[in-house]
Every structure is written in C-alpha cells, then in structure tokens.
Image (cartoon, grey):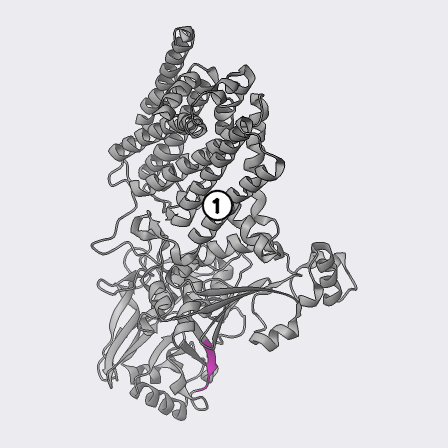
Amino acid sequence: MTSIKIAVSEIRSIFVSPVAWVLYIIFVVQTSVRFVERGLFTVARQQFDGVSEGQSFASYLFSANDFSIASGLQDNLIFYIPLLTMGLLSRETQTGTIRLLLSSPIRISDIVIGKYLAALAYIGLMIAFLIALLFLGCVLVPGLDYPLALAAFLSIFLLASAYAAIGLFMSSLTSHQLVAAAGTLAVLSILAFIGGVGQRVPILADVTYWLSMAGRAEYMRNGLVASKDVWYFFSIIGLFLGFTWFRLYFQRASLDLVGRASRILTLLGVVLLFGAFTSRPSFTAYWDATFNDRRTLGPEGQAAMANIEGPWHLTVYANVLHHQINRHLPATQRPTFRSLFQDFVRENHRVHVEYKFFYGPTKNPALFREYEGLSDSEIAQIFASQYRFDFDSFLSIEDVKDQIGWRADTPQGGFYVLGWNGRREVIGTFDDLKYYPDRRTITAGMRRLGSSPMTIGYVVDAQSRPVLQRGASSHFTFVGDYAARYTLVNLGFDVEEVSLKYSNLNEVDVLAIADPKVPLDEAELVALERYLETGGNLIVFAEPGSEEPLTPLFGMLGVEFDSNSVIQSADGGSLDLAYPDLSAGWKTNGLLEPPQSQRPVLIGAVGLKPVSGGMFDFETVLTTGGDGSKTVGSKGVAVVAERLVSDKRQRIVVVGDADFASGSALAAGVGTRPSILLLSSLFRYLSEDQYPITFDRLLDGPDARRYDDSIGIELRDLDHFKFYLYGLIPAALFVFGSGLLAYRRKW
C-alpha cells in the first residue's frame, strides 16, 4: 500500500507540471491527425473511388502502415517518455527530499514501484485515448479487425513501459532533469543499435542481439506477438528497475566497489539467463492477430514443414563483390533470418544456420571501375581488410561450385541453401526492390526439400518455342529465369527441354508444347500418344497461324480451331489484345481471380472449341468476345480435360495464345502480373495443386475474414471529426490543465 500512496502523490506532481499537459495535448493531436487523415480519409476515398489498395482499415490506422498511429507513436515515444520520467527521482535529489525518503522506514522497493506506477498511469491515459479511437473505428467500420489494433496497442504499452523503467533509472543518477532526459535518450539509442555490435563473436553476438530493442515492437505492431518479445520487455523493465533499486540502496547502505559491482553483475546475469531461456524457439509461443492469420504459414507452408522431420540446415552464401553485400554482413544477419524464416522455424525449430562469404563474377560496375585491373581475389582481399574479415575463410566461385553445384544464372548477390536428410535446395535473391526471397519462394524450396519436385518438359521438336534461352518469343522470362522472382522455377518446378523421340518422358510430370512451326512427324506423334496413354499431363500453346502444325495434334486430342484470331481491342500500337473471362465453376485456388482491371491479357489469341472423336472430352474455361470484339459471339481461348488413368488423374490444357507468357509481352508491359497469374494457375491445375505455391491465406471459406475496407461515412463528413478531434478535445484538455495548474497550490 505504501507504493500506491507514493504513486498517487507522484501522479499529482506529474499533473501539476505543464510538461505533462503539453505532452498529452501533442499526443492527442498527433494521433487524431493520423486517425482521420491516414485512416478515415484513406478508406473513405477508396470507397468513393471504388478501389481498394489491399490493406485493412485497422492496418492503415493502427498497425503495419508506416503512417499509422502505432508507427508514429513508436517513433515519438523516444521523446515523450524521457520528458515524462526525467523528474521522477531527480526532482527529489534536487530538493533534498530523497534523503528523507531514504532515512525513513519506507522500503526502497516501495519507492521504486510507486514512482514507476505513476509513469505507467500516464502511459495508461495514452492507451485509453487509443482505445477510444479504436471504439470509434469499430462504430464506423463494419467488422473492424480489432485484434490487429490490440496487438499494436500492446506493443506501444510494452515499449513505453520499458522506456519508463530506463527513464526512472536515469532520473536516479542525477539532480538535473534535462541531464536525466538526455541520458534516457542515450540509453535508448544504445539499445536500438547494440544488436549490430560483436556479431562475429558467438557469445557476445547472442548477448548484444538479445539486448537490442530494434524491431521487437514492430513485429507486434504488424500483428505477430511472440512470447520472447513480451518477456524481453519484462526483462528490460525488471533490469532497470533493479538498477534503480541498487542505486537507492547504495545511498542508504555503505558498500565497497566490489560489493556494488557483484550485486549489479548478478542482476545482469540473472536477466540474461532468463532472456536466453525465454528466447529459445522451443519455449516461444505466438499469437497471430492478423485477419486470416496472415503472419502464420498457410496450409501449404505447414504441409511442407510437416515433411521435414528432425534437424534441418540453412547455409547463407553471400558474394562480397556484389553491391548488396551489406544485406548479408553480420550486423544484419540475425534480423534478416528472423524476418525471412521465423514462420518456418515456428513449425520446426531444429535449424542450424551458417554463413559463408565468397567472391565471384557479379554485376557491380562501380566496384570494378574503382579497382580496375585487379582480379576478383584481390578485390575480395581489400574487402576483407576493410571489414576485418579473415580472407582465408572466403570461398572462391570454384569452391562454391564444388560444394553445392552451380547454375550460370544463380543469383550473384546471395542465396540460401536448405539442407535436410541429405537433400539440398537453393533459394536465390533477386535484383528488385525486395531483394530477399519471400514466403512463397521459401515455401516452394521447403516443399521441394521434403518431397519430390515436379518437372516441366518443354518440347523442342517441330521448331517449338524454347524455354531455357532468353528471347522475344521464349517462355524463359516467366518459366525458366532463376533471376526473376515469380517464375515457375522459383516457385517449385524443375524445367528442362525435351525431345519426344529421344527423351525419357516418364521423368516428366507436365509436357509443354509451345507454338510449333511445323507439324510433329509420325514418330513424335506416336511418342506423344504413348505418353498420354500412360496418364501424362500436357499443355499446348497455340497461336494464330499455327493451324497447320497443330491440326494433327488437335485431332488426336479432341480440339479444333474456332477462328483465326480473337481480338477484343487494340492497344493503339501493334498488339491485338483479348481479355478473357473465367468460366463459372473452374477453380483456380485463388491464383486467378483478380479484379476487372487485372484480367488476363492474351496477345493475338486464336479461338478453340472441343470436338468429339478425340482422346479427351474438353470443356472451355476461358472465353472472350462480346462488345468491341472483332469476332462474332463468344469464343473459347482455353480448354481443359480430365480423366482417370490407372488411378492417376490426367489433365490436359490447350491455350489459344503463346505470346502472353513470352519475353515480348514483358517488354511491352502488357498485363505482366495477370499473365503470371494465368500461367501459374494453368500449371498449378496440371500439377494437381502442388506447384506453384499459392498465396498463403485465401479470402474464401466459411471461416475467412475479409478486409475491413468499407466505412459508414462519406468524405464530406470528415470535417466533423476534425472539429472534435483536432479542436474541441485538445481545447478542453488545455482549459482543464490550465485550470488545474492555476490551483496547484491547493494540492
């Protein structure tokens, strides 16, 4: 009870200070501006325009968005809290009342807890205003994703509480309040950057990384609450409250330097041991507060990790000559690992991580201009000297080839090698804004690691389009390019070029024939027929003008051409475009259900229709025609067929366009994303939903929650909220605070 009395007395002292009222009014105005401008206005404008940017209202307002309330508060707390806590004990020291407190029978723990509770009370008022805004959001937005907001508020409370404990300790060290505030700011800065210190020394790296505060609140703000982060904040709070207790205790008790140091080091050791225990993956629990659990692996990721039983390995290879090498240096290794692989470690935490640096050819013209005339090895030695690395630990490109094999187009910046049970999979990085592999790419690697990959065989007979060479007509750009993020080879498939007569088609899971220029000969047709009779899957890409080469094959399958060309509109240039619609009932597993503005785009498609008398009974799944069409009526541009062969489900796809997945389509900028989705959807259908990996969480099913992206007000109504939140409430706080300060002598 003594600590409560001290807390009440301290609260009175806080609220008869102008600083507390000014800080709170600034806090209210800043959060209100973000609530209205970044929350209400953004969603109301999207609703007015009839578009959605794919983020929930709760994300815009409270959490992951960079302009959200939580994001702004996390940036501002480093200034709010030092100003709030700077006088908690320094004021007592300055006035001399600290001597009375220490000479009284009051326990030091009551003093520390009472002062700290007063700071928590002020933080509680800040959280109360946030909850009021959350309640208003729930009223205005149907189905508001409030768990995400609550996770963000938890991160703010824990972060502010840790800051307050640090501020209380710094306040105990000096009689000058501004010095205490500056000291608090200095300690917070150290804790923000200490994670990059000593990362080459294993034990020191563990300690400094655990002490680092950077990123911990962001994970919670983004919707994933990990017990190790919660325990971290509790540990920091306990550590600095303990330091404060010792500071006051040493003023009351007479101890030599050894006695003081031993007690402080004991406290620090206990906290570090507790941190080491609670940070272990096997003792970490998680709460995913996002809608549809988007911060948790989806069913495909969980199934992939279920196949990986026991220990697995992750080796990170980084090219020291690449311009992105800073992304792989020791200071960034642990945060990057957590960002990329935390969701997978949740499913199987028995992972061993290793980092290796190598030097080899790369696209870094600035570096090679600076060190013109030097070999790769000599430049790598300069890098090692500058960053204090042991050059002897670096691998050459030949060493890497010997260890893991090598593809000529393996990303040259860095790559991740997964290992388990004697198997190995390589996941690349990419020369785009994201650079790192994303969850889909990693999931594909994990699935391949734990099960057999599927192989696409592109037929090279009959002058068909290639897939392993870059070119305007080649499918390399969307299928076989390891350097591009969403190609099929990076989403689970193996791709190779095959000959119908000379290759072992039994090793191919999906056979692809792309726009042959001459008819298949009799031996090739016989080999293809034998492949189909054994249940092999097939996809054929046709083109206007390919009637003669494909008619024999189509006759065998049960398809015929319906028109020379299907064109809905011209792009103003040389491309004739068609925008097909999915036939009702054809499932695409979420890959191909984009909004109208993102419909698939076919370039000079040819019409197709099923006929009887072939090996298969086809149905049309993509149709085009209608207004603006140069064809009469609706035309099919893709057909599919299924049948059971020896208990195996066989699937056949015929598409009336080969250009939509070509390099020329990418160069022209025509429907790139829809083209990727269409191609991915077709091959996923052929692989019986194995590859490519889909988006982790689909917005369908009875248990799915939708984006809370609609609002019950219009744009013109926002002025009312501005009046109350920007004007009336801050004015009322100003009047009340001023009146309280005017009568402070009566307290």
The secondary structure that most of the magenta stretch takes on is: strand
Q: Is 93 placed left or right of 302 in the picture?
A: right
Q: Quadrant of residue 571?
A: bottom left
User: Residue at (27%, 58%) from the top-left corner?
Assistant: 626
Label 1 sits on a secondary structure element that is helix
* Front residue of 602 and 102: 102
Identified by mark 1, the residue type is Val
Residue 495: percent from left, percent from top: 46, 76
Residue 558: percent from left, percent from top: 27, 81
User: Residue at (33%, 49%) from the top-left corner?
Assistant: 287
Of the 4 image quadrants, the one containing the C terminus is: top left
Residue 285: percent from left, percent from top: 36, 53
Visible residue check, residue 182: yes
Above or below 261: residue 13? above
Residue 545: percent from left, percent from top: 41, 75
User: Range of the magenta residues?
Assistant: 495-499
**Residue bearing mark 1:** 271
